[in-house]
Image: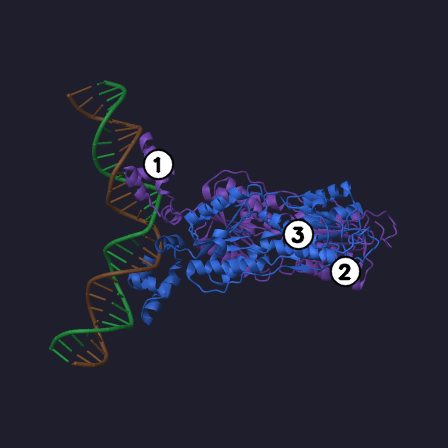
Chain colours: A blue, B purple, C green, D brown
DNA sequence: ATGCGGGGTGGAAACGTTTCCACTCCCTGC
DNA sequence: GCAGGGAGTGGAAACGTTTCCACCCCGCAT
């Protein structure tokens, strides 16, 4: 591979001049520019990224950690970050976790790897991280933002939806549609955002005179398979509920799949509501009613903040982007005293 | 950040000794190892990746280009590559394309970016690349493998399923199940693998006395939305077919979604068959019958070959991994002269 | 004439590693 | 007693950039 020295020699200029032409900054004569350009062309010169990083201490690269490679949930977020980053002329290196159980450890190692790798900043998405974990990350790489995790001490670097409000919105939607006998499939215990959305959901239920303590509940792990299993379990225990709230869309899709095979009409006999609003959720039969969490926008804003941190840009950063219910067809609106069973008075 | 010089000084050893301890190769005394380890600990030393790459000319990193960030199709492939790579102690940098239309240009730029970035080798997945494009890539980075693209000149670096045989398998499955009136939704014109699977499909049809020329066909772009539109179009033109073959699962899911909303019973009135075998395909209602293309295995073998190329490993490389039909419930088996319509004699 | 400022230039130094060579011990075998 | 060799060591050189400083030359004001 040709180096900048070769270019300089061939163009008959000094090292500094060649460098200035390539970087396009310092003062250089028209003539020198032409000659250097020509030499670059002829030698097929490409600057060495490693040498540049070593010298400048900047790589124009942002590191991103997400817990999983697969999954309809994370890829759109990655997509949003990727396109915004490319638009600003920088690049992205991604590191993935192996599973939701190992999320914490994976995220820690991922952050370390990305930092060692010379990333100028980090976007870390990992709900399981503790406050001390964040400190550890911050120690090595002070430029980072957190997605879907809230830490008071790092409030300005945390970007997350209001899961509590979104959970409440789900409850409102279901209740306003006339449902009173509900059931839920939650996410895993380690997921703080699951806890939040469930809390919001249950609190809102109180406003309709429903006791959250008696809510039939199953626990899943956010996978479709667990949604399927949870539905079977719930139906086996006591099938008298008219609506099922799933803590994410993938579990809701599992539920829909199970119900389809079991011959339970949706929303005729049972309504199903999801959470997140992943792209695929509109493809189910019937199309899934869900809470749309504006993940793409949240990620884009987190990135803007990080870019400001890293490169002193002044990009706008919006923090409060509300979730909203996406009404489709998997939730029935039932009248007071409808056929669906004994409804508690509103 | 502490450098290796600081470490050496603190440990009271020379630069070379410190380096040897860190790399774990050369001969070093027990005592020196202990002292260097201690110094590293105390100074929180982390070697500079950039400096290492600059010096060694190797980054232990493989670059991967895939056309799209989102999509249920590419992520499992990425996942397979990622996990295999981590298992061998190396890393992955991914670059994405923007759309299927710009695939060719994106792949070219992506390969260039990844090469500049110091990747030791490349995995490029881009059907639209021409033979000349590959030459151009090879010129800069001779270590690469191609996924889902076949170029005679680079035969040993091409890893792709036998789309023609897989297409034929789909046709056989449908015909053996008793279907004679078929329709298809193809992928985009630029997609060579679409062309191949369709050719296989049509050739196999000949064996059942079906004239492929009269096959009702719609063209999609692999997206669910286009599967939906294609189905509507086909049904509007002439609804007498009993089975619909879609060139990929996402279009098949779109078809299923449309049919569900239109009240067309699947597989009661119309059978649907997909292609690829993405994870989500088992979640549809009814579960999608599809041709399972062993993408994960193919990708893993391509990676092994690349690793052999780059690092002189001797990993096993399997080239012929057959596709197979995944029988689920979206295709009905109908008897001769069944209620489904006038069937041509087998 | 002389001084001064600035456009244009060349090259040394620095970034943090690894590799290689030269050197010192010290042990072994004669 | 000495040659030979291997374990252990230190440091210079090199990897390919960018940055900074010194310098030249020219035009302009004094």
Q: Which element type, helix, strand or loop, lies under badge 2?
A: loop
Q: Tell me if residue A188 can be seen.
A: yes
In the picture provided, is A14 more to the left or to the right than B89? Answer: left
Taking the spot 68% from the left edge, 55% from the top edge, the residue there is: A170
Residue that mark 1 sits on: B38
In the picture provided, is A316 more to the left or to the right than A188? Answer: left
Please determine whether, in this image, residue A280 is positioned above or below residue A227: below
Of all chains, the one bearing label 2 is: B
Q: Mark 2–mark 3 contact, CB under 8 Å? A: no
Taking the spot 50% from the left edge, 65% from the top edge, the residue there is: A316
Residue that mark 3 sits on: A203
| Residues flagged by tags 3 and 1 on a common chain | no
Q: Residues within 10 Å of mark 3 (few under 14, many from 20)?
A: some
Of all chains, the one bearing label 1 is: B
Sequence order check, earlier mark of 2 and 1: 1
| Residues flagged by tags 2 and 1 on a common chain | yes
Of all chains, the one bearing label 3 is: A
Please determine whether, in this image, residue B215 is positioned above or below residue A181: below
Question: Where residue B292 sits: x, y (%)?
Answer: 68, 46
Tag nearer the camera, 2 or 3: 3
Total numbered circles: 3
Q: Which element type, helix, strand or loop, lies under badge 3?
A: helix
Mark 2 and mark 3: span between their CA atoms? 55 Å
Q: Which mark is residue B216?
A: 2
Q: Quadrant of residue A98?
A: top right
């Amino acid at each position: 591979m040709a180096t900048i020295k070769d270019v300089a020699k061939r163009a008959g200029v000094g090292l500094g001049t060649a460098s200035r032409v390539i970087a396009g900054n310092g003062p250089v004569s028209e003539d020198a520019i032409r000659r250097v350009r020509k030499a670059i062309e002829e030698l097929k010169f490409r600057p060495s990224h490693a040498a540049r990083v070593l010298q400048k201490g900047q790589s124009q690269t942002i590191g991103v950690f997400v817990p999983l490679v697969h999954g309809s949930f994370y890829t759109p977020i990655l997509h949003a970050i990727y396109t915004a980053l490319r638009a600003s002329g920088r690049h992205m290196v991604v590191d993935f976790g192996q599973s939701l159980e190992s999320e914490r450890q994976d995220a820690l190692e991922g952050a370390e790897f990305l930092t060692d790798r010379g990333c100028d900043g980090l976007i870390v998405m990992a709900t399981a991280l503790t406050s001390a974990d964040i400190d550890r990350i911050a120690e090595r790489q002070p430029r980072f933002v957190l997605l879907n995790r809230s830490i008071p001490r790092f409030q300005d670097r945390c970007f997350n939806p209001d899961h509590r409000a979104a959970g409440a919105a789900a409850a409102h939607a279901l209740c306003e549609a006339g449902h009173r006998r509900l059931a839920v499939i939650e996410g895993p215990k380690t997921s703080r955002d699951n806890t939040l959305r469930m809390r919001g959901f249950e609190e809102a239920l109180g406003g309709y005179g429903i006791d959250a303590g008696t809510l039939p509940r199953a626990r899943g792990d956010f996978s479709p398979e667990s949604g399927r299993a949870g539905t079977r379990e719930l139906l086996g225990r006591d099938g008298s509920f008219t609506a099922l709230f799933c803590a994410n869309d993938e579990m809701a899709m599992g539920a829909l799949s199970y119900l389809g095979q079991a011959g339970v009409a949706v929303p005729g006999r049972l309504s199903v509501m999801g959470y997140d609003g992943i792209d695929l959720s509109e493809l189910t039969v019937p199309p899934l009613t869900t809470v749309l969490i504006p993940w793409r926008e949240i990620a884009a804003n987190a990135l803007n903040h990080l870019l400001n941190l890293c490169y002193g840009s002044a990009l706008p950063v919006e923090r409060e982007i509300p979730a909203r219910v996406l009404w489709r067809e998997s939730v029935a609106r039932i009248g007071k005293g409808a056929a669906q069973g004994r409804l508690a008075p509103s």
